Image (cartoon, coloured by chain):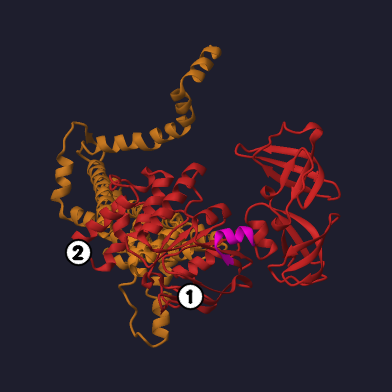
Chain colours: A orange, B red
Amino acid sequence: MIGFLKKIYAKHDNVKAYSLLSPALILVILAMIVPMALMLSFSMFTQVSMMEIDYTFTFQRYIDFFQKKLLVTLLIKSIKISFLVTLITLITAYPVCYYIAFYVKKNKMLWLVLLTLPFWTSYLLRVFSWKIILGTKGVINSSLINAGILSEPLTFLMYSETAVVITLTHAWAAFALLPLYVSLEKIDFSFIEAGRDLGLSRFEVFWKITFPLSLPGVIGAILIIFIPTVGDYVTPALLGGTDGRMLSNMIQAYFGKINNIPLGAASATIMLTTVVLITIIVSNVTKKLTQRLT
Amino acid sequence: MNNSFIQINNISKHFADVKAVDDVSFEIKEGEFFSLLGPSGCGKTTLLRLLAGFEYPTSGNLLIDGTDITALPPDKRPTNMVFQNYAIFPHLNVEKNIQFGLRKLGLSNDEIGKRVKEVLSLVKLEGYEERFSNQLSGGQRQRVALARALVRQPKVLLLDEPLGALDKKLRDEMQLELRTLQKNIGITFVFVTHDQQEAISMSDRVAVMNNGKIQQLSAPNELYKNPKNIFVSDFIGETNFLKAETKSSDGEFINVSIEKLGEFKIKNNLNIATNSSDVVCSVRPESMMISKVKSDWDICLDAKISQTSYLGEMTRFYVEAKGINKIITVSSQHFDNQSFENNECFISISLEDICLLNKK
């Protein structure tokens, strides 16, 4: 029996490949595909009462979603917040990575480690520390008041969309640094010199050579930040107040307090689909734009 | 023709405490194929990068066609460069790579199209417009790099070891092609290489560099026949060095005592001092004769062959001559490794083939 298995194993490369993949594959199936399938099926059921679910298939929950103005508004708000977070992160992280890739000669690794140092503490802790910084009696407000610049604390800082954007930007910046750095680091400096040699100014060389060549990193950073922040629910729950609430908070409520699991599942599915669509559109548009640029 | 088309005046470039280029001055003629030759780290690439504008000199100034370019950035200089790794933009196809340098020249679309077509036919790459860098062979990339630089019609084309990455056969072909191309278009070429054979076979003049300084600047045959110092003699081609001492001189000739061989009258081209032991005699392997019987040449030595290597067009013999504690290399087209009995032979040297050099 063992001899027979060994023979199969030696003969067929795909058997080898699957057996190497199997631990990961099992994990992905159990932890990703099964829950997703469950969510998808639940989105097509109906909550009849507190404890009772009607298991006949219907698309009514999806129609419900688009008929509830609040849910659509929250979806749009989630996307808007994530979009802002992604944009701000890119604008701030890109120059830093550019500097490390092209101007730091020694100890590049040290620079990267130092930049990611704040991210060694837990996500939750960092969210709480922003509470201390942004609160009405927080670091910013109390120093501005003590300095006599303000008489009243700035209220828009805390429990607002602004707070969510600031916190998420800081929380995810480290994940943008690495893909951006790697793609910039790979660019041979002679491409930049060649651009200058062929008559372009520094600025033109950046837009026509450096930026297009770093695009894989830019798209990578966009996806890495956009996808998880759309669905983030800790930060809006702790810092968002009513103004900064996102769709994920509502989904959580549907599975909890409100107890409408099918509508929660339908909302989650819609959000997932939207994210996938936006991701595809963003990467294609970015590529097209760059082709136009060059 | 302008004899001082490019003027390099007292140029120095220091990196921290390293003098990459150390107070160098020379001129390059218009339309010349000029080579900078030297071992790695000799400063040749730095000098080329100074001309391109990628580095700025620590001191000194640079003029091209009468204009001081010392402080100009690369995009404002009348030069274009062919990079060692070609630096073909990977996100653009061949046509766009070549057009890249034309967009700032203010040409009409018709003119751009015409120029691209012309330069593609010049480097024999018609039909490759749509290809990307990773779809080209090393030789084709080299041609794209050349076309991209030439299409701007620069006053000076700078080439940084452009043939280094090619295999031997292709390199020989490209050497000939580059030379023909340069003569046809008449643009001044400044060519950097560490390959002495490449430099002497292609160039009108060669500057041999070492330790940031020019060791000798002359036509290739002069470099080979009349090296000015021991470095040049050793770097260009192969040679044998023999210990020597100078004695009295009578103007054109000087009496030289060569180790164990006796005293000889040798032409003193370099004005070497009399009664000096800081000199050395250089003899090229192919200027010596190897024979089975004694010859009547100026010097004829008993010798024993210790090793031979057959190179096809000739054979190289490594011989131990009586009285000289050193292996001498002799090359010959007339003998091969089976010609000698018991490895015994005679090697003959003519006095006019001995080159007297200062040790330092």
In the image shown, does A273 or B194 lie closer to the viewer?
B194
Q: For the residues carrying marks 2 and 1, which lies nearer the camera in this image?
A: 1
Q: Amino acid at mark 1?
A: Gln
Q: Quadrant of the C terminus of chain B?
A: bottom right
In the image shown, does B292 or B274 lie closer to the viewer?
B292
In this view, A206 is above or below B73: above
Check disc 2: other Cα within 10 Å, few if <14, some if 14-19, many if 20+: few
Where residue B64 sits in the image (x, y, percent)? 42, 74
Span shown in magenta: B217-226
Q: Quadrant of the N terminus of chain B?
A: bottom left
Q: Quadrant of residue A265?
A: top left
Q: Which residue is at 45% across, 50% downward?
A: B176
Where residue A71 sits in the image (x, y, percent)? 20, 53
Taking the magenta stretch, the answer to whether it contains residue B132 is: no
Q: Which residue is at 79% across, 32% downward?
A: B341
- Majority secondary structure of magenta residues: helix
In the image shown, does A278 or A138 lie closer to the viewer?
A278
Residue at image mark 2: B108
Counting every numbered tag in the picture gives 2
In this view, A253 is above or below A80: above
Q: Amino acid at mark 2?
A: Ser
Res B38 visible:
no
| Residues at marks 2 and 1 on the same chain | yes
Chain letter of disc 1?
B
- How far apart, in angstroms, are the residues tagged by discs 2 and 1? 34 Å
